[in-house]
């Protein structure tokens, strides 16, 4: 009877969601003036290449399918490049090589000599001590939970913050069949800030028309639930979504399409002395069809996307050969790890966190044991991703979970990998909680019970530092949603101090008002070196260098596998490794670094190695 009630409750919830998403909340503005044909723009600058995408309303009345990008020089507008307006989708993609990023430049996109859309290409902020990233996620517009509240508060706060980069981590659009209409609204809402600030935008499941997605290298799936793996919407729909949202990103690391001809956009961005890896969590992730084969006792009636039985041993679910990031993205991350040109610190941007940091979902009435939509599964794929990411001492930033969290990840031991910050939803369509039954172990004095060391639902090791749980009021109200735990994230990278500060702000506040506060567990400040600081380690000699701020890369002597790579601060560095053995130390950049071969790791190593350049 209890199982039947739960099933009925889940079915009702699903029907409500589908009904809401089936509502026609938007339509094209009528009689668009030719002067208003351009809706918004987004751009990035990477290694002296400007890429800018202009989004248009429908081209009508025999108007040209061509647009022009102009910049202001000496008070005059000068054309620098033309672009066709692509159909469907009405996007113009501009590319300018050999862009001079040493100065701020005014630009405008021109259509038919009637529509003019202006913005600012920022100067590279590489000389700033503090790099500021504004991070947002989950942009539902449905009114039942406050999604129809204007984005004015967010836009005003972003203007006051004046970030160096804006990051939208996915679910910019929640409609599952009319991306174009809802994407135009996204641009109208945020256009005043993204026209003037470099912006990273990546797609997630709702953007491509699914509630959850396991991309499975792009294969076709027959059901919108997607649990078999793949994409439900036609490939051309997916490709147009990605063209609209990601075509302004730097060129992909490896542009080889996946199945159905769907493209990829995983890449890196160097800006302001920072290096960002931009990932696609879902695109290569395995579907769930093989789960019953390896765990028939858990799935006697076929696969499911979530489990609620607390007696299940979820370690059995780590099935062989299941992918998370996939081999291609792991290869990219390995290459990115040692590329420190024009970079002092690194950070990974992805759709969501590499763990399951929630245990109640929808309503606070039943504990969820295993949520396969999270990147806590597959466990081996999760651990592979974290083991590569920590090599560059990278902080991770993501979204999707509708629950702001800061977590330190563990692979073999708690805390032996990096920190992640998941930002709260712009509008909290589907609420989640982290509400463990037992207090966390080894938590800091006076810290809340939900912090400390835990196993997540898939038995991954996590150390929870901060959570923006819904309030008791929302818990008692059950499914009635609000903007209570909605908001946005701010990440401040202090390059001289090598610290990272996570800020978690609610909606409808003034970030400049000292009386307006963040969610109670924030801000959280960590050291860059905390992202690879295991409790159990061995030491290489102390490096004393004649030049400061050098790149130091540690490799295993046996196979040249990279153990760590870092632009150090200062002239002294004491490398740590995870195993005894022999290592190669590389110091410097380019093709001719200084190398020391067969350097032994010891439990305690106070030897000094003087490095002269």
Image (spheres, grey):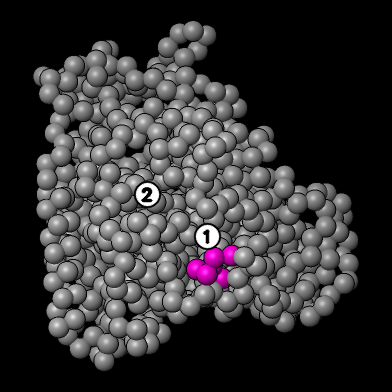
The disc at residue 591 is none
Q: Is 58 inside the magenta-drawn segment? A: no
Question: Looking at the rendering, in which quadrant would you find the N terminus?
Answer: bottom left
How many marks on residues?
A: 2
Q: Residues within 10 Å of mark 1 (few under 14, many from 20)?
A: many
Query: Measuring 19% from the left and 75% from the top, which residue is drawn there?
Result: 6
Q: Is residue 147 above or below residue 90?
A: below
Disc 1 element: strand
Q: Is 448 inside the magenta-drawn segment? A: yes
Q: Looking at the image, can residue 191 be seen?
A: yes
Query: Measuring 55% from the left and 37% from the top, which residue is drawn there?
Result: 515
The disc at residue 484 is 2
Q: Looking at the image, can residue 409 be seen?
A: no
> Residue 78 sits in which quadrant?
top left
The residue segment tinted magenta is 447-452
Residue under label 1, please give it: 466
């Amino acid at each position: 009877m209890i199982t039947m009630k739960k099933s009925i409750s889940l079915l009702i919830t699903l029907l409500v969601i589908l009904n809401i998403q089936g509502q026609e909340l938007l339509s094209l503005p009528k009689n668009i003036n030719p002067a208003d044909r351009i809706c918004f723009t987004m751009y990035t600058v990477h290694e002296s290449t400007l890429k800018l995408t202009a989004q248009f309303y429908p081209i009508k009345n025999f108007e040209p399918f061509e647009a022009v990008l102009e910049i202001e020089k000496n008070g005059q507008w000068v054309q620098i490049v033309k672009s066709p307006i692509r159909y469907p989708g009405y996007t113009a993609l501009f590319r300018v090589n050999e862009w001079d990023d040493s100065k701020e430049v005014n630009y405008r996109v021109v259509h038919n000599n009637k529509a003019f859309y202006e913005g600012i290409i920022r100067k590279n902020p590489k000389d700033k001590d503090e790099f500021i990233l504004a991070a947002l996620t989950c942009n539902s517009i449905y009114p039942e939970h406050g999604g129809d509240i204007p984005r004015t508060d967010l836009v005003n706060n972003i203007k006051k913050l004046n970030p160096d980069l804006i990051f939208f981590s996915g679910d910019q659009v929640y409609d599952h069949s009319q991306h174009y209409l809802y994407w135009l609204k996204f641009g109208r809402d945020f256009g005043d800030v993204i026209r003037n600030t470099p912006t990273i935008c990546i797609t997630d499941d709702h953007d491509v028309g699914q509630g959850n997605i396991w991309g499975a290298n792009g294969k076709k799936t027959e059901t919108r639930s997607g649990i078999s793996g793949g994409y439900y919407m036609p490939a051309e729909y997916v490709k147009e979504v990605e063209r609209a949202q990601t075509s302004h990103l730097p060129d992909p690391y490896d542009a080889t399409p996946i199945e159905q001809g769907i493209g990829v956009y995983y890449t890196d961005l160097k800006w302001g002395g920072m290096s960002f890896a931009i990932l696609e969590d879902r695109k290569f992730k395995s579907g769930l069809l093989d789960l019953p084969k390896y765990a028939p006792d858990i799935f006697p009636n076929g696969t499911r996307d979530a489990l609620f039985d607390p007696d299940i041993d979820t370690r059995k679910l780590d099935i062989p050969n299941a992918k998370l990031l996939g081999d291609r993205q792991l290869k990219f991350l390995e290459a990115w790890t040692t590329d420190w040109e024009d970079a002092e610190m690194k950070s990974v941007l992805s759709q969501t966190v590499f763990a399951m940091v929630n245990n109640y979902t929808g309503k606070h009435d039943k504990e969820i044991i295993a949520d396969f939509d999270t990147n806590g599964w597959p466990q081996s794929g999760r651990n592979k991703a974290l083991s590569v990411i920590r090599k560059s001492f990278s902080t991770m930033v993501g979204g999707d979970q509708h629950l702001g969290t800061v977590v330190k990840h563990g692979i073999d031991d708690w805390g032996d990998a990096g920190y992640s910050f998941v930002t709260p939803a712009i509008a909290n369509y589907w609420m989640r909680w982290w509400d463990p039954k037992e207090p966390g172990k080894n938590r800091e004095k006076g810290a809340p019970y939900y912090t400390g060391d835990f196993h997540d639902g898939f038995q991954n090791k996590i150390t929870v530092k901060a959570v923006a749980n819904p309030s008791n009021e929302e818990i008692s109200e059950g499914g009635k949603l609000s903007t209570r735990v909605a908001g946005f994230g701010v990440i401040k990278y202090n390059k001289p101090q090598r610290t990272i500060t996570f800020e978690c702000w609610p909606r409808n506040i003034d970030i400049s008002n000292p009386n307006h506060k963040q969610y109670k567990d924030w801000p959280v400040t960590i050291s860059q070196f905390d992202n690879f600081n295991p409790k159990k380690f061995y030491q290489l000699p102390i490096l004393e260098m004649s030049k400061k701020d050098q790149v130091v890369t540690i490799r295993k002597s046996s196979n040249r596998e990279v153990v760590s790579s870092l632009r150090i601060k200062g002239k002294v560095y004491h490398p740590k490794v995870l195993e005894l053995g022999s290592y190669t130390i590389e110091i410097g950049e380019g093709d001719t670094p200084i190398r020391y071969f067969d350097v032994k790791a010891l439990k305690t190593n106070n030897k000094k190695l003087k490095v002269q350049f």
